[in-house]
Amino acid sequence: MNKPPASRPAVVITVITAALIVLIDMTVANVALPDMMGSLGATSEQITWVLTSFAMAEAIVIPLAGFLTLRFGERRLLFTAIAGFVLMSMLCGQSDSLPEMICFRIFQGIFGAA
C-alpha cells in the first residue's frame, strides 16, 4: 500500500479553514442585516439582496470549480480564492451604499465558491 503524502493534513486543514471562513461570513451577514439596513438606508426587501447576491454567485461558480482547478491548478485557485474573498470582505466592510455592498458580495460569492 502507498503511504499518504505528508502534506495531506495541511491540505485538509487548509480546505476546512477556507470552508469555515465562508460559513462564518454567511452567518455574520445574516446576523448583521438589521444593522446594514440602518447604515445603508435600505428596506427589508432591498437588504435581502445582500444575501441573495452572494448565494447566486456561489451557485453559478461552484459547478465551474472542477474546470477552474484543471485550468489553473489547485494551489493557485485556492490561493486566489482566499485572497479575493478576504479582499472582498474588507471592501464589504467599507461599503457606503447598498449597490456597493451587493457588488462586493457578488464578487465575494464568486471567490468563496472556489
Image (cartoon, rainbow, N blue to C red):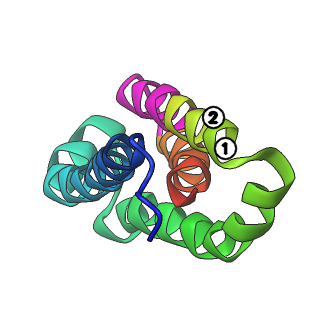
Q: Position of residue 64 (x, y in %)?
A: 74, 70
Q: Which residues are magenta?
A: 84-97
Which of the 4 quarters of the picture holds residue 110?
A: bottom right
Along the viewing direction, whichever of 59 and 77 lies nearer the viewer: 77
Q: Which residue is mark 1?
A: 77
Residue 91 position in % (x across, y down) = 48, 26
Residue at the farthest right position: 71
Residue at x 71%, y 69% (from the top left corner):
66
Name the disc covering residue 102, or none: none
Location of residue 65 by image quarter: bottom right
Residue 90 vertical placement versus 104 (above, below): above
| Dot 2 alpha-carbon crowd within 10 angstroms: few under 14, some 14 to 19, many 20 or more | some
At label 2, the amino acid type is Thr
Look at the numbered disc 2 and give the secondary structure of its residue.
helix
Q: Are marks 2 and 1 in contact (CB under 8 Å)?
A: yes
Relative side of 66 to 20, left or right: right
SS class, disc 1? helix
* Residue at the image position 19 percent from the left and 50 percent from the top: 28
Quadrant in the picture for the N terminus: bottom left
Kindly identify which residue carries mark 2: 80
